[in-house]
Image (cartoon, helix red, strand yellow):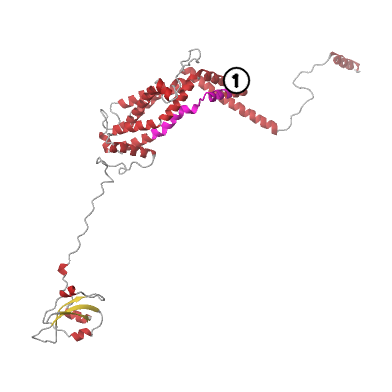
Amino acid sequence: MAACWKHVRLCARDLHKLKTFAPLKTNTWIDTKRLHTSIRSHSFLCQFRSNSRHHLNRPAVVCVLPITRGKSTTAAENAAPPSTTDYIPEPPPLPQAPELVDTLNALGEPTIQSLGLGGWTPSGMVQQGLDFLHVGLDLPWWGAIMIGTVCLRMLVFPLVIKSQQNAALMHNHAPVMTRLQERMTDARASGDAIALQRATVEYLAYMQKNGIKMFKSMLVPFAQLPVFVSVFFGLRGMANLPVESMKLGGLYWFTDLTVPDPFYALPIFTAATFLLIVQVGVDGVRADMMSPFMRYGMRAMPFIMLPFISNFPAALLTYWCTTNAFSLLQVLFLRIPAVRTKFGIEQMVKHEVSAMPKKKGFVQGFKEAMDNAGRASQFEERQRLDAVRFKKAGEGPMVKTYSYNPTKIQTIKPSKISNVNKTVQAKPK
């Protein structure tokens, strides 16, 4: 007789007796009626087999397996009992490799972001720009710094044109402007407020008539100051970290850009080019148009800053040397007549020696500057006291007046003197 499957319910006692979840021997006989009438605690699948030779009406239990309530079995599932040896678990997921894209760039070097540099600050944007030139164009660090410097200077070039235009106007009208300034100085020294105001109005009117504006001469220095500060802190941060690739990104004798120049060639070249810039007036401020005190102060600046810049990293001095060299080439380019005509810059007029004021020495110019400063303070103090007196005169009590001028000496007529003498003689003694 073929084997068949039936659903039966086993109680806890029957499960313990039959050793559930394990195959039973073929000669183990159970009462099916008892199984059907047991409590409804669990559902199991039992396989029974009839024995034709012994106990035909009492099937033998082969195995007992759990089933799920409410699910029907198909013919394929009924054909053979499930086996635990056929189940193969899913393999565990493979560990993922770390992302190298976020930590290394195309050259196999650590990115700026992974080193904690970059960002949207001015110095961070400078660092990102230099990293783009270094990685994107495959340039060494010294080349990236030089090309980046040239790009920044080209952005400031329109301001340089305006400064050169204003500098040419100031040079061509220097004799008249100098005479007006001397009139203002003399009026301030004498304390004449009306003369000072008149000279000031004439000076401003002359500048407005000829299109001269003093602030245009300072456009380039004011525009380059934030750029220089951003590049200074950006390169110093990269050198102090340091960026490892910058240690071999130099040129010739300064191969390491993170340390100072061992031969002091870059600091000396920087100071020398700065002195030339001050002398020729590259950025629109010429030395001969400055006051003597300011002119000598600017000329002494390269010698004062030389000991300090000697300890700067070579990367920073590479930028400084590049920007100074670009300025000198720029002034040579703007001295070409065709270029000056193209950009609307007037040609420099060569003034006669008699028309220009006599240049003063450093000591005399320093004394004159100090005297002018003292006179200006005295003039302001005098104006303040006059304002205080005027206010007190308006708020204080009325001053007693006379029918005659008490400041003048009264003259007595001779007739009145004789009458007074007669009156005195007529009185009894």
Part of the protein shown in magenta: 201-229
The number of discs equals 1
Q: Which residue is mark 1?
A: 190
Residue 171 is a magenta residue? no
Identified at 47% across, 25% down, the residue is 166
State whether residue 240 is above or below residue 89: above
- In the rendered image, residue 88, in percent from the top left (x then y), is placed at 17, 64
Tell me which amino acid carries mark 1: Ser
- In the rendered image, residue 340, in percent from the top left (x then y), is placed at 42, 23
What type of secondary structure mainly makes up the magenta span? helix
Identified at 51% across, 14% down, the residue is 355
State whether residue 231 is above or below residue 277: below
Q: Quadrant of residue 412?
A: top right
- Residue sitting nearer the eye, 115 or 417: 115
Q: Is residue 200 left or right of residue 136?
A: right
Note whether residue 370 is visible: yes
State whether residue 211 is above or below residue 36: above
State whether residue 165 is above or below residue 357: below
- Residue sitting nearer the eye, 298 or 424: 298
- In the rendered image, residue 284, in percent from the top left (x then y), is placed at 44, 25
| Residue found at the very far left of the displayed protein | 53
Q: Quadrant of residue 17?
A: bottom left
Note whether residue 291 is visible: no
Figure quadrant of the C terminus: top right
Would you call the spot at circle 1 few (<14 residues within 10 Å), some (14-19), or many (20 or more)?
Answer: few
Figure quadrant of the N terminus: bottom left
Q: Is residue 139 left or right of residue 362?
A: left
Q: Quadrant of residue 269?
A: top left
